[in-house]
Amino acid sequence: MGGAVRISGAALQLPGGVTVRFMRTLRLPETGTHPLPPGLGAFPLRAVADYPDRAPAEWMTRGGVFLPVYQREAMWLSFSAAAPAALQVGVGKVCAVSGRPWSDQLSQDPQNYVVLPRQPWLDGINSGSGTIRQFVAVPLGLGATVEGQFSGEEVWGGVQLQVFELGEGPLVAWRAEQARRSVSSRGPWGVAAEEAAHGGAVPMVAPAGGPPRAPAAAMGLGAGGRMRQEVYRDERGPGDWRERSSGRVFVHLATAPQWRQITGEGPPPSPVDRAAYTQAGLPWFDYYDADAEDLPAAGPLADVRPVGDRLGEDQQPWTQPQPGQVSNPGRDKGQVTDGEW
């Protein structure tokens, strides 16, 4: 379906010049509202198709990519784009922006996508009023995922991405406008400043026999702590976007043992202690685009319960960042198969 999706280092390259990175980060407390936590490097990515004898059968059917994640580890998605694009983000086939079931079509009422590159990142599900609830990895089967709270079942897990490009006329007009303007290489079309140093090259590893096929994935995304982050309203009309997507990809979440069994590689180290990070004086981030309009709360997503309500609290003592640690970066900042899903 659609165009090619490729892995480039630790990034996903989607059609339309869209790049997505999955960033490791600190998990926030589930009470209060916080600034954006820092990136701790990109999760490594591997193509499911490179491991036909080891990847779970369900993964082979759905295609896509996979990454290693620890239980209750948090993540955020970093975006960049060579041209305007509409990107749908699903968590267990629930739209992270609108809270509606996954759809193959764009919708503006309610909006079920983010607009790139104006949206530089997405740290969680849209809880509205300038906030989101952090993406946190949790096991399937306990009802703690967003998917489980919506449907009563936990079947899909993972993350789903689908990109729509501008139609021919709007794209020609956009290119003409760009020709009249001087846009810095570190302007709104580049990688966000605070994560530019993360995510070095991660080689594709060809399977060479050995361990048996791994069991099916058992991880999805639940809702964690609340942070300040706008999810921006699309200022274009619905007719500006193509009716059909240019490409899509299913991102499977592997446990650390699964990752080792499938790839033969060790997973990344467990996340850094939050208090130690803050006490070291390392930065946190705030982002506010005064020219963009934030989407209202997505009704269904506003009622999603945090994972601690289902799995119990295991929070370490929380150390608040000092005011000087919170900065605002502003606007500066292998082939993947697709299957049945």
Image: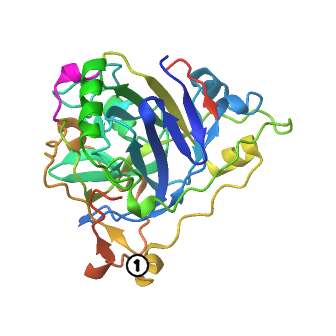
Applied colour scheme = rainbow
Image-based side of 290 in relation to 313, left or right: left
What amino acid does circle 1 point to?
A: Thr
Q: Position of residue 180 (x, y in %)?
A: 24, 40
Q: Can residue 332 be seen in this view?
A: yes
Q: Position of residue 319 (x, y in %)?
A: 35, 79
* Residue at (45% x, 60% y) in the render: 195
**Segment colored magenta:** 235-241
User: How many discs mark residues in the rendered view?
Assistant: 1
Image-based side of 256 in relation to 15, left or right: right
Looking at this view, is 45 or 318 the one in front?
A: 45
Q: In this view, does 25 lie above or below 52?
A: below
Callout 1: SS: helix
Q: In this view, does 337 lie above or below 211?
A: above
* Residue at (30% x, 25% y) in the render: 166
List the residue tagged with mark 1: 278
Q: Is residue 238 magenta?
A: yes
Q: Is residue 182 magenta?
A: no
* Residue at (35% x, 26% y) in the render: 165
* Residue at (20% x, 58% y) in the render: 288
